[in-house]
Image (cartoon, rainbow, N blue to C red):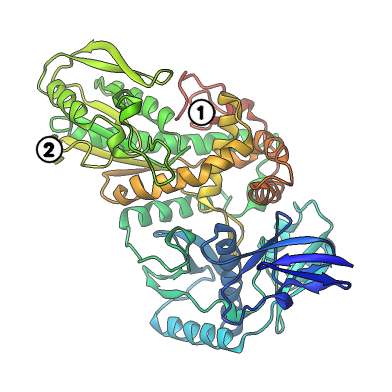
Amino acid sequence: MFTVNVQNKTYKLDERTPIISLVDNSDKEFMAAKVNNRLRELTYELCYDSKVELLDLKSPDAVKVYETSFRYLLALAFHNLYPDYQLKISYAISRSIMLTIISPKITMDKKMLGAVKKELDRLVKADLPFVKTSLSKEEAYEYFVSQNELDKADTLKYRPEKICHFYKCGDYLNYMFGYMVPSTGYLKHYNLFCYDGHFIAQYPRYEVKGVIPPFNDEPTFAKVLNRAHKWAKLCNADVVSKMNDHVKEDSYIDFINMNETLHNGMLHELGGMIADDIENIRLICIAGPSSSGKTTFSNRLKIELMSRGINPLRISLDMYYKDRDQIPIDEYGEPDFEHLNSLDVALFNEHMQALIDGEEVELPNYQFGNGRAENGVKTKIDSNTPIIIEGIHALNDELTHTITKHQKFKIFIAPQFQINLDYHNPISYTDIRLLRRIVRDKKYRNASAERTLEMWPSVRRGEFKWIYPFQEGCNYVFNSALTYELCVLKKYALPALQEVKNDSPHYITANRLIKFLKYFKEMDEKWVPCNSLLREFIGGSCFSEVDE
């Protein structure tokens, strides 16, 4: 006999019971559940004292379950219609996923789109169950080889567990890196449309309370992602198994330097763009989400410009914080240091305009200890010196409203990966940044992974409010991803995540990241250059600062 509490009801049970049988989910509102602080599928059978919390699409964990299941559904639809085509699913612009047929000479057009949508709707209406089944790793490998899905077969080589949990729907079998909803009928909310020779698929997002957000065309970012996809193919690392093949003594040094050379090339390209218009550019504005590598990038851009005879002045927006008692209060009653009005915008504009006009100003020196600005260094620049500003609001014209647009050169920086675990399971850009931050916070701030995970939702809210709305209007997008970095970060991130106890409210996220990292082979960091963006997180950088 055991006790289960769910939806404010208590059940006394004496046999294994699926969660789904205890709840009214006729409208398929709930996608998954927390059971004693562990993420579980609704088909999970309870057999012990349990506190069950049902999760709908306002929960990030539920949305991940929905997305994983939706990718399965897309793969199933293509399998039913075009069994000889090989489908790749990647993360794309505007919080969507992109579908690409990588089989040669296949056109993804409106006719194919109509057929796929019709099949998706049929599958959803049929409400077919996703049946969980298990195979040994050897059996799973042989199965995928027989299906000519070598990307999945090769990835399983790096799975540490001996058993693989598959999902079967009809005669279709697939292995997904995540939990699933009970049946196809749960996946009724989606958009699918043609985009630049591919299909874009949208699904509900927790950031907008479980609905599908409007699609914002972002051509600048689309080009960056396309470039990243071509790079991953070029360096033979578009899936984790191929990347792990580089982790050999005789090739990983070349692999590291290939990726660092890509960053060098982008910096050279960017430096040329700025130099060509240096007569007009007075403010170089750099922004990006947390753990994008902004500080190292700013230093390297400064050096790139110096090599062209341009000597920029770097100014941190942190210098312009208002006194702590003037910081706006957020919805939770806490000081909102990410709000634009937490900065002295008027003083910042006064100083920038004065510097541009050749006047001397005394820059503030904000003291985080007492939350007040003190007198700083007197500064004056000539007409050939651009000012580099870096911070969360750098791309927001409200921050620099007195500076004319043609005098501003805007740069957005973020890691934009186009690498998959296998062709149906892409790697999240957000997870990469979170892992970077966990490693950096542990090393530089003596902060536990649990503390970083606790702060992360607030960080994400600030990004959606203050960074992403301004990204598309920039002059250049710098992709700070290094294809090899997860093989290096694993050494630091894995033990930090393993410290998160199973009764922590952040255990679900930590456990998911641990399972993900286990697929990557560790790479020795000794050949990572001292000026690499990765050094900002693992240490050993020739630049003394760290990204805030």
Q: Does residue 360 sit above or below 245 in this rendering?
A: above
Say whether disc 2 or disc 1 marks the residue closer to the N-terminus: 2
Q: Does residue 28 sit above or below 243 in this rendering?
A: below
Q: What residue appears at the point 21 percent right and 25 percent down from the top-left corner?
A: 386
- Using the image as rendered, state which of residue 27 and residue 122 is in the foreground: 27
- Give percent across and percent down for residue 521: 70, 42
Mark 2: amino acid:
Thr
Q: What residue appears at the point 55 percent right and 66 percent down from the top-left corner?
A: 88
Q: Does residue 302 sit above or below 510 in this rendering?
A: above
Q: Which residue is mark 2?
A: 404
**Label 2 with label 1: CB-CB less than 8 Å:** no
- Give percent across and percent down for residue 533: 48, 31
> Is disc 2 surrounded by few (<14), some (14 to 19) or many (20+) residues within 10 Å?
few
Could you say which disc has been placed on residue 536 in the image?
A: 1
Q: Is residue 85 visible?
A: no
Query: In the figure, is residue 92 to the left or right of 21?
Result: left
Could you say which disc has been placed on residue 231 in the image?
A: none
Q: Is residue 49 visible?
A: yes
- Per the image, label 2 sits on a secondary structure element best described as loop
Q: What residue appears at the point 40 percent right and 59 percent down from the top-left corner?
A: 93
Q: Does residue 200 sit above or below 508 in this rendering?
A: below
- Using the image as rendered, state which of residue 179 and residue 482 is in the foreground: 179
- Per the image, label 1 sits on a secondary structure element best described as helix
- Give percent across and percent down for residue 106: 48, 75
Name the residue furthest left: 357
Query: In the figure, is residue 309 to the left or right of 89?
Result: left
Work out which quarter of the rendered image holds the N terminus and state it: bottom right
Q: What residue appears at the point 30 percent right and 51 percent down from the top-left corner?
A: 472
Q: Quadrant of residue 524?
A: top right
